[in-house]
Amino acid sequence: MPASTYNYFLFIEAVPVTEPFTSVSGLGSEISVAKETIVDPDTGDTVIESISGRPTFTDIVLTRPVTENDGFWRWHKDIIENKDRRANCSIAARDASNRIVAWWNIEKAWPSKIVVSELKSSTSEVLEETITLSHGGITRVPTNEITG
């Protein structure tokens, strides 16, 4: 049965984050496919096989209401100033009863992009910031292995 999640939390070494995110996308990876020509040792026939190539990881995009917490902005500034501040982090999806329903570990993440929604005085829309994390790997952790 699918979980009815409503908030996502980011746990990260580099930035203290206490506010939930309202959306997360890009939790994934892809392995390139390479073709290899081999000779079947039994028949001598030439066979083309698909083999796994290098993995690539999609950028993770997180959205949340703007708060007083400027940790992502400071972290992003460090990257701009060529300070290598990649950090491991985790993303937890929690349902309406605050139970963790999914968990992902992210390796060597860093904020490659930060964008604030359009600033308009004539609207009651919530001001949001969108943070894009580039990273070096992602793993889905079974919920029975999560503590806390």
Image (spheres, rainbow, N blue to C red):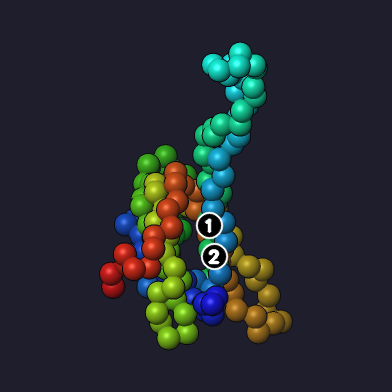
Q: Secondary structure at mark 1?
A: loop
Q: Residue furthest right?
A: 122
Q: Nearer the viewer, residue 5 or 68?
A: 5
Q: Position of residue 93 (x, y in %)?
A: 46, 71
Toward the left, the furthest residue is 147
Left or right, 129 with respect to 94, comes to: right
Percent of width and height locating residue 134: 50, 48
| Amino acid on which disc 1 is placed | Leu
Residue visible at 64% across and 16% down?
A: 45
Residue type, mark 2 in image: Val
Q: Nearer the viewer, residue 129 or 140?
A: 140
Residue 114 visible in the picture: no
Residue 128 image position (x, y, % from top left): 57, 71
Against 78, residue 101 (above or below) is below
The image's mark for residue 27 is 1
Are discs 1 and 2 less than 8 Å apart at CB? yes
Badge 1 density bin: few <14, some 14–19, many ≥20, Cα 10 Å: some
Choose between 57 and 121: the one closer to the eye. 57
- Tell which residue pokes out farthest to the front in this image: 42
- What x and y, as percent, mark residue 146? 32, 67
Measured along the vertical axis of the image, is residue 97 above or below residue 115?
Answer: below
Secondary structure at badge 2 equals strand
Q: Quadrant of the C terminus?
A: bottom left
**Residue 18 in view of the camera:** yes
* Residue where numbered disc 2 is placed: 24
Q: Does residue 87 appear to the left or right of 125 in the view shown? A: left
